[in-house]
Image: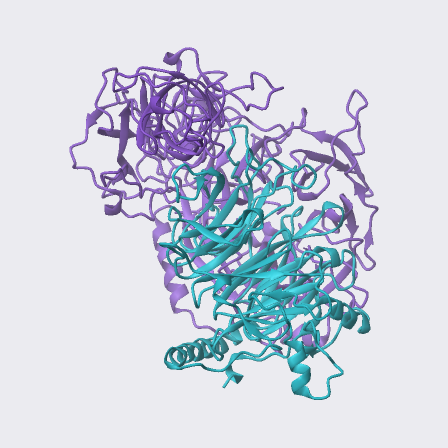
Amino acid sequence: MPRTLAADPVRLPALAALPALSALLWCGCESAAVETTTRQMDSASDVALLCALETRHEDGTTTWAGTTMDQCAKDLDGDLFAFVVQRYRGELAAVNLRDRRLLDLDLRQPLSSPVVVGPLPNAIAAAPDGSSLAVANLGDPRPGDDPTNPDGVPFLSIVNPANLLPRISLDAGRPFLSRVPLPVPASNVAYLDATHVVVTLPGLSAVAVVTLGETPVVGPPVVLDPFPLLDPEGDPLPGLGVPWSILVDDVRGRLVVGDRAAPWLAVLTWDDAFALTVAAHAPDPFQLPGPSVAMAIEPPGRGPAGDEPGRWIYAVDGSSRGVMVLDAETLAAIDMSTGDPLEWRNELIVPGLAQDVLLGRIAQDPVPDPADPEPEVMHGTFGFVVSSFGEVFAVDVEDHGNAACWDGAAAGEGSYVESACPRHVLRNGIAGAEGPRWSDEPPSLFQASGAALSYSGAPPDEYPRFHDFGGETAEGDPTWGVLFDTVHPRRAVSQTWIVEYEGVVPWTDGNGGQVGDAGWFRDRAMPFCARGVLAGDILIIKDGPDPLSEATDCSAWGAVGQEAELEYRIVEARADRLLLETVVGADGNTDPLPTRECFPWAVRYEVRVGGRWLVRGEATGFQHHVTVGEDPDPTDDVPGLCIEFPDDAICTPYENCTTEPVDVRCLHDGRATDGVIHKNPFLCFTMDAGTVATPRGMRWELDATGGFAALSVETGSLPVAEALDVTTGTGPALLVVDSSSDGLIRVDLADFTVSDNWP
Amino acid sequence: MRPGKARRSVRFALAASAAAAALAGCFGSGGIDPPGHRFFYPTGLALSPGGRYLLVANSNFDLRYNSGTVDVIDLAVVDAEIESCLGRCRGPRDEAQFFAGYDPAAPTLDERNESAGRHTVIIGSQVTDLAIAPDGRRAYAAVRGNASLTWFDLDEDAASGARVLSCFGDPSPGLRRCDGGHEVIRNGDLWLPTEPYALLVDRDWVFTGHVDSGDVAVFDVREGGDPSLVRVLDVFPEGVNGFARQPRLDDPGTPRDESQDPAWYWLVSRYSTRLYPFLMSMESRQAGEGPAVSTGPSIAVDSNDPGTDSRSLAFSPDGTRAFVANREPPSVVVLDTTLREDGSVDGSTLATLDLGGGPSRLVMLPLADGEYVVLVVCFDAEEVFVIDPDLLAVVDVFRTGMGPHAIVPDPARGRAYLGNFGESTVWVLDFTPGGADFARTVLEIGTPEPPTSHE
């Protein structure tokens, strides 16, 4: 959803007053009388903030006027309203954030909102001066459903808050809602200035400017597919078939449009008459990691003069569940894979699916001591990511604790050099910790003593909520578990793992193996590469021969119809098949290669590791020297080869999780677990793999280091959008709407806790 | 308050009456034979491949009768009725007139009703789903009441006077009960588990998912043979509730050698957060063990918290996207199911879209020019949500009758048929691209009969 954030820093009350303030808010919330009819919201899809000033006249009447957000911040008489679009009701709800009441906008019909904005409203935006609100609907009105719109013309709703907020004016018949006909439904809307809005029109693959006023005018749609510009060689640039997200970078005079599915952006400019011109296809080269389905830009105001444009754009990646960080100038995505070791990825990845994102600047007064950082205190520029998982995550954009980021002798001394220390890491939520960091302690590895707690002894909903720790070995022992620090239950301090030597590769036991010709063995259901199978491993066929014809002599493989342990060395491992050779098995015998004549049916099998350590676990990026390489012969029908990196030593030092070699993607253990890639390891382990062979299947306990839990707060189910309240009247807070449990949640940024919710 | 919530009391009444009726049914003898010309708690719908008939499975949920039925609706009559209404009929219509074989000229009401039941067959109670084989010659029903896979011969081109649907030796028309040979409950010592709920019918195999145990029963129907229970898989979590076959890009044009490149089947569960793939490979080596079944890496519905209780799923026509109806919270989760180089599925979550309460069935409806929409039936909210796969957004919502559940697309007509379980009706929904009634009901078949009106 597009949003415009206030540029002014916020001055928080003294830190000492925060707990009291928070408590006061809670008490006030619990004891406040319900004076108006409240009503559950329903499937909220977006929220916008609007500041309005109330004037009481001598004749007893009251008028309201929308105004700029900073007016609301400076003037405590101003009331801040949250306008929430309700997707399936097609209505607009309003909450007065000052007195925390859902407004009953029509006294005559207490259970009905008079602000009917049309079918399936998807986005809302507020004018910079508070003079109006605009709502875009994805739904296409149909003829006959609405008597006021008999032809079913798509429209943009424009709300006049001055006529809406004084409820009495509804009786007076003052118009508070107008409709601007559009050629097709709009998916999104944003203000260019107080009287000009831009809408995305997916049905036309276009954007258009609407000029508001007595007689609104819809400008000509600017079609983005086919893209109106050519590349330097004169070739067509890929278009935006489904324009979706809008970002107004008014300091740079840019309009950035993202597509619902295409991983690139369109950059447009506007002239004095607000005519749009496509200026660029971005970035160059135009490939982003994924489509930008929601975007937010850092508010302007950095630098000594406080007038520099925002440096970063955060964009929700519609294909990866993460958030991309773009350079606001070049619109190129930043590759963060070489950054913080705990952020071993090129995006910010959160549990669940990123739904919305925004960036804001928060200034504490006084500035907290960087040498003694308190993770609860947020000072600087932060990103906030709403996850479908029902959480909001805080992202550190700058590193105020790093001395190198200051022009003085130490952290906190001199001025903070904002351009020097971009950070973009999930904010650590562990009290007392300095943030995500990597332990310098030497790794340790010791045999399990049985003292480790099983996972069932720990609070399963605290950490890590998106992994299944219910596994057991054949003997019934827990395969892994988490030992929790009793003081900080979200901080896992140890974890139990299975470390096997020449053991069975996890999840490689199959019952659909098919013997092929010339030593090939196939099971299409088994992703051998993803499971970590390598050349040199041992395939064990567990079924004896069962020939089709009694005339075939299969006695070389044992008795017909009996179980067996036929062992073969894997000389080539591919995505769904293996090439076998004979080997002297554990029983000292050499089993001949199986033939189709003697093994015409599916067989049971498993793969045993050949001569090296295998680490099995979850929640962290253990490295394994495996990658899926290029197909050696694309002309055949054999998929790509499982490539063994030529030098085992490159992947074996587990000094930390950042030592992934260049040009090879060491296998994450997560890939061996149902194909899940943990791009954002919340825990990282160091270990000494050792060089001494140990008995197969022995359990070991590993010390965990660098325990990390992201700073997050739980919201209602399926949150979809957020807005940043930067007024002093109510304190800096996030407002998060969730679409499933029908609520609006206020997150106090002073301590990053939920401080209120409506209704 | 949403109308769906207002009707909750009705559903409670329904549940109570069902429980009472269940007890009565247990102790009764014989009971009342079901009508052949009525809907009563429909739970399964299936469209014959040629588009001539709509089969409606009635569950007899409250055990009012001693059995359930499968009705045959003549879609030519439906077409004519809609045409007579100039595209959109107002008000419900009595269902009997749409039954195949209905004779409006019969002199008495009883005779007209009897004519409406000429093609109806009687099956066990509590049918949960109904499906037709790809070749159109067989229909199958998962029946909880007698824990069977009940099957029917289907003759869409039946000559006048011959049965469209039969599950007994005698092919002559008339309301009649399926014989035991068409109710598969065991194969030797291999018994079909209780509570068959989900059903998937493919060319060579039929699967039933059993909601309490999580078992998946495999029936061999290769080369047109009678269904034979050949395996019961116990590797999946409890609560198996929905199946889908993952299409492949080359499915429509190029016949694949499925012995070398078999299709992936997927299932979802009420008690798991994951989607489980499996495939049928070659004949198992062990005599009597049935075909070999391989399971693939499961993928997680991890965009939702808790993400359990998935009820159904469907794939895009090219198989690269899976749409999953999930109830925790009520939503549709869209997953990228593109096959990676290593043969595994991508599994990335593309979107999670909030819905009304109680999503149950989800189907993909092909439109013209390769386009399609996804339809999700929400039982509690009593709404159908229409999802545009390009926008990955809900683009329409419309009210249904009470307790909507079963839905089947009819791409050739640009329609879908919706079974309103709670009021025993079937609605015809229009999905003609660009039409004025897109995503609207154009005909209501059956007089709504809320549960409380049942004696």
Can I make out residue A292 in this image? Answer: yes
Q: Residue at x 68, y 55 (%)?
A: A138
Tell me the shade of chain A: purple
User: Of residues B281 and A436, which is closer to you in this image?
Assistant: B281
In this image, A130 relative to A694: left or right? right
Q: Residue furthest front?
A: A551
Q: Residue at x 40, y 33 (%)?
A: A603
Vertical placement of residue B213 versus B17, above or below: above
List x then y, in percent, for residue A465. 37, 45
In this image, A570 relative to A101: left or right? left
User: Of residues B392 and A112, which is closer to you in this image?
Assistant: B392
Q: How many marks?
A: 0
List x then y, in percent, for residue A542. 34, 30
Tell me the shade of chain B: cyan
Vertical placement of residue A441 versus A430, above or below: above
List x then y, in percent, for residue B34. 54, 78
In this image, B264 relative to B398: left or right? left
Q: Residue furthest bottom?
A: B108
Vertical placement of residue A316 versus B421, above or below: above
User: Of residues B328 and B241, which is closer to you in this image?
Assistant: B241
User: Of residues A589 and A240, which is closer to you in this image?
Assistant: A589
Vertical placement of residue A703 versus B423, above or below: above
In this image, A567 relative to A102: left or right? left
List x then y, in percent, for residue A441. 26, 23
Please identify the quarter of the rendering in which residue A111 is found: bottom right
Can I make out residue A79 in this image? Answer: no
